[in-house]
Amino acid sequence: MKKLICILFPLFLAFSSWTQKQYTLNAKIATLQEGTVKLQVMEQDGNLKEEIIPVKNKSFAAKGSVKQPCVATIWINNTRERYSFYIENSNINIQLQNTEAGKKFSVTGSKTNDAYENFVKICKETPESEQDNCAKKLVSENGSSVFSPFVIQSTLVYTADYSELKNLLEGLSGEAVSTYQYKKLQERLEALFKVSAGQPAPYFEQPDANGESISLKEALQGKKFLLIDFWASWCRPCRQENPNIVKAYEAFHEKGFDIIAISLDDNKEKWLEAIKADGLTWTHVSNLKGWENEVAKLYCVNSIPSNVLVDQNGIILVRNLHGENLMKNLEELLGPIH
């Protein structure tokens, strides 16, 4: 952790001290002799600026200004090829080169982008199990930086529950709270509150494999506790978690525990094959729209596996019980297994 802060903190200090009033962008694009690029700049207030720039002799230039460091994206010659970086009011040089390892995009002259690249580098060097703690430490030590909301949005928001996200946002101040990312995080926080512990589970209905619509009310009928489980056949962590859910179901089903699984699949055949292969004998529904599943959006699910445990009155008790935590919670609610 000390390494993370020592490398990045001087760069964060520099963010609030930049005095140049415009940026100059000079780019060398080895992959494009002639053509155009589209420069998109997403200001921190949410205002999107776009500019079409001609490329001549593998080069282009641009000038402009931003109120704060923010994310810019270069789209290459009307294709889906794009590269993002942090732009600020400074002299910035960009290179896109062909290398043996593939295309290499590099940026110099933007201190904010330097910090971003260092953050990515350190995260890659940090064991996966510690990456969230790494990001939380960075945010807590640099609460006024415009970069901190981005760190939350890019690394923590997908797994943070309402309380965690609330604590993270309460630690931000100064320029950080005027950023576009912060405003989006506040919207996320409001949505998470509606599906947090103590709140009524939002009503939903979706079709099962036979096309019959199953509602939350129907799934709860006659049950003491219901697990709303979000998963997909293509999700390896979900498939690895399924044996734990099967164990809990078999142990507590007769005591009043049940499950309704919402799949984020878009292939019916693979969905049904996974249900059979993993021995998932409870209720399954899906609109087969992948991440466009309305129930997943309603419950603020941005990563899977994810689940919500509700009581017989449809009140949310807890979110994201995995591994032995699911068994322990059910034992506390329904009594030990005999």
Image (cartoon, grey):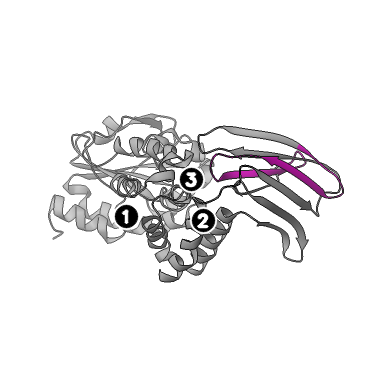
> What secondary structure is marked by label 1?
helix
- Which numbered disc, 1 or 3, marks the residue that appears first in the sequence? 1
Percent x, y for residue 310? 24, 41
Q: Amino acid at mark 2?
A: Ala
Residue 95 sits above or below residue 19 on the image: below
Q: Residues within 10 Å of mark 2 (few under 14, many from 20)?
A: few
Percent x, y for residue 159? 38, 51
Q: Which residue is mark 2?
A: 14
Does the magenta portion include 187? Answer: no
Q: Amino acid at mark 3?
A: Trp
Label 2 or label 3, whichever lies nearer to me, is 2
Magenta stretch?
Answer: 53-79
Residue at 73 percent across and 61 percent down: it is: 102
Quarter-of-image position of residue 50: top right
Asked whether residue 45 is in view, the answer is: yes
Q: Which residue is mark 1?
A: 246
